[in-house]
Amino acid sequence: MEERFYAATCLALFGLLNSYGMASALDIKPNVVLMLADDLGIGDIGCYGNNTIKTPNIDQLAMEGVKLTQHIAAASLCTPSRTAFLTGRYPIRSGMASSSSYRALHWNAGSGGLPVNETTFAKILHQQGYTTGLVGKWHQGVNCDSVNDYCHHPLNHGFDYFYGMPFTLLSNCQDNKTPDLDAAFQAKLWFYTQLIALAILTVFAGKLAGLFSVTWKGCIWLSLLGFLFFASWYSSYGFVKYWNCILMRNYDITEQPMRLERTASLMLNEAVSFIQSNKHRPFLLFVSFLHVHTPLFTTERFLGKSRHGIYGDNVEEMDWLVGQILKTIDKEGLRSNTLAYFASDHGGQLEAQEGAIQLGGWNGIYKGGKGMGGWEGGIRVPGIFRWPGMLPANTVVDEPTSLMDIYPTVTHLAGGVLPKDRIIDGKNLLPLLQQKVKKSDHEFLFHYCGSYLHAVRWHQKNTGALWKAHYVTPIFHPKDAGACYGKGICPCYGEGVTHHDPPLLFDLSRDPSEAVPLSADTEPQFHSVLKQIGKAVEDHRRTLTPVPQQLSLYNIMWKPWLQPCCGTFPFCWCDKESASTPSVNVG
C-alpha cells in the first residue's frame, strides 16, 4: 500500500514539475528496463503497421509512450550492433567490426569480445548506485586467455547480475534442426574428410591387391593423419550444442546444453525476480530476448496460434513476455518511476527459410534485411519509450535516432558523466522524447557492413530532407530477389558487392523504400549533397584510430582451453535448473 502511495505521489510530483519545466532540476533516478529483441523486423509489430501478427503488449507500450519511426541500428548483425548499443559507439571504434566474412562471434570458446577498456552504460549506472542486471543473450564474448578470466563477461562490464546465454541461439541448439553455424564451411570439411577417407581406403585396397608398393607402416600413418584431420574439426563443429548452447548464472553454468522447452520460462522468472528484489532502490535491467532468432523454439501455449507460422508464434510469445515484465513493473508500484524501452538489435533475416517456410522477419516497406549494412531493412528497427508523467503518451517522433543513443540517455537520467577519453557517437534523446526540441541531434549517421562503410545518411534539418548515399550495395541472389538467398547472408566486400561511383542517392523523406535512386537530372542538389556527405565521411574517418581486431580469425576460432565447462573437459554436461521450478510459467 505504501509503495502504491509513493508511486502515485511521485507521478503527481513529476507531472507538476514537468508542467513548470522543472523536472530536470529534480534529482530523479528512475529505474531503467531495456528490452531488446533479436532479429525482429520492424514490420512484425502492430504499431508499426502489421495487422496479422498480434502484439498487443508492445502496441500498448507505444500508446502509453513515444514511438520512434527512424530508429537505426549501428550494425545489421548481432555482435557489432549490441556492442554499439552497450557502448554508445560505432563498433569499428572498439575493434568489433570485422574485415573478413566472420562478422560476429562464433564460439563461447573464442578469445574475442567486448574489450575490457570499453565502458558500458551498465558500468556508469553501477557507479551511480544502480543495481544492474542482464537477463538473456550476451554475445559479447566470455574469456580472453584462460577459461576463468571472464574478461568479456557481463560481470566484468558493469552488470551486477547475469542470467542467460553468453552466446546466441542457433539451430544447433535444437534437435532435428539443420546446423547453421558455418554450414557452408562444415560442408567443405565433410567433403574433404570423405575424399581423405576414400584415398585411405584406396591405398589399403591397393596394398592388399599388390598394386601399391607402400608399407603397412605408411598406411597406418596415413590413416592417423586422416583421423587427426577429422578430429581437429569435428571436436568443435560436432558438439556445438554442448559448446555454445549453455545457460549461465553469473559465472556458473546452470545448463549445458540448455533445454529450450523451458528457457523462456526461466528467463521470464529471472527478469521478474530481479525487479521484485530491487524495487526499493534504483535498478537497471537489460532484458535481451532470445526471441525471435532461429530456431524459433516456441512453447506449446503459442504454437499454431498466429497467421504466420512458427515465426509469428514466436513473435507473439515474445510480446506476451514483454507484457509480463510490464505487468510486474506496474504490480510493484514502479510504473511512474521506470523508463521502459523496447527495440530490436537489427532487421529481420530474409534468407532464414526452411523449405517454403519463412523463418525470418518482415521489414515492412524497407529494402533489405539482416546482414546488409546499408539498406534500411537491415538497420531500421522499432524503438519505443515509456515513462508515465515524464514522457508524453501516444507520441510519434519521425526523426533519425540510433540504438547508440540509449547510452547517453540513460547516463543522463542516472546523473552520470559520459567518458571524456573517447568519442561517444550516441546522443541524449530525452529533449526529443519530451518534445522540448523538434529535431534530432544527429546530422550524419554512418552505416557499416563489418568494417566497410556502405552508406551514409544526412539529416538536412533546414529543409527536412533525409539524404542517403550508398557507396557499396550487396548483389542480390537471385538477381533482384531483394536478399542473398543463395549465400545465406549478404557479404560486405569482394565479388558479392557493387561499388557505386557516384554513390546511389535517395531522399528517404520522399522515398523511404529506396526504390528509385536520384540523379543529376532528377535532383538539382545531387552533386552538392554528395559533396557534403563526402566531406562528412572524411571528417568521420579522421576520428577513427587503430584498435585490436576482436573478430580476427584467431580471436573467433574455437579454443578448447577457453571452453566454459560445468564438468571436466571434454565431458561438459549439467542440469542445475531441474531442482528449481520457475515461479512464472509461460506454458
Image (spheres, grey):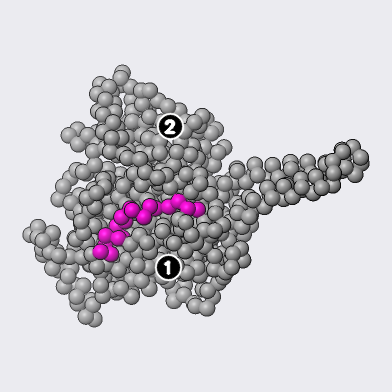
Q: Residue 87 carries which label?
A: none
Q: Which mark is residue 250?
A: 1
Q: Which residue is drawn at 38% across and 73% down?
A: 273
Q: Position of residue 154 (x, y in %)?
A: 39, 61
Q: Where is residue 196 in the image (x, y as percent from the top left)?
A: 74, 43
The image quadrant where one finds the N terminus is: bottom left
Q: Which of marks 2 and 1 is nearer the N terminus?
A: 1
Q: Which class describes the residues within 10 Å of circle 1: few (<14), some (14-19), or many (20+)?
A: some
Q: Where is residue 482 in the image (x, y as percent from the top left)?
A: 48, 36
Specify whether 491 is left or right of 58.
right
Q: Where is residue 398 in the image (x, y as percent from the top left)?
A: 26, 44
Q: Give SS at disc 2.
A: strand
Instruction: Look at the image and give the residue range highlighted in magenta.
Output: 110-127
Q: From the image, give the main secondary structure of the stretch colored magenta.
A: loop
Q: Residue at x 43, y 47 (%)?
A: 550
Task: Say which residue label 2 marks.
Answer: 473
Q: Which residue is drawn at 76% across and 45% down?
A: 222
Toward the left, the furthest residue is 20
Residue type indicated by callout 1: Asn
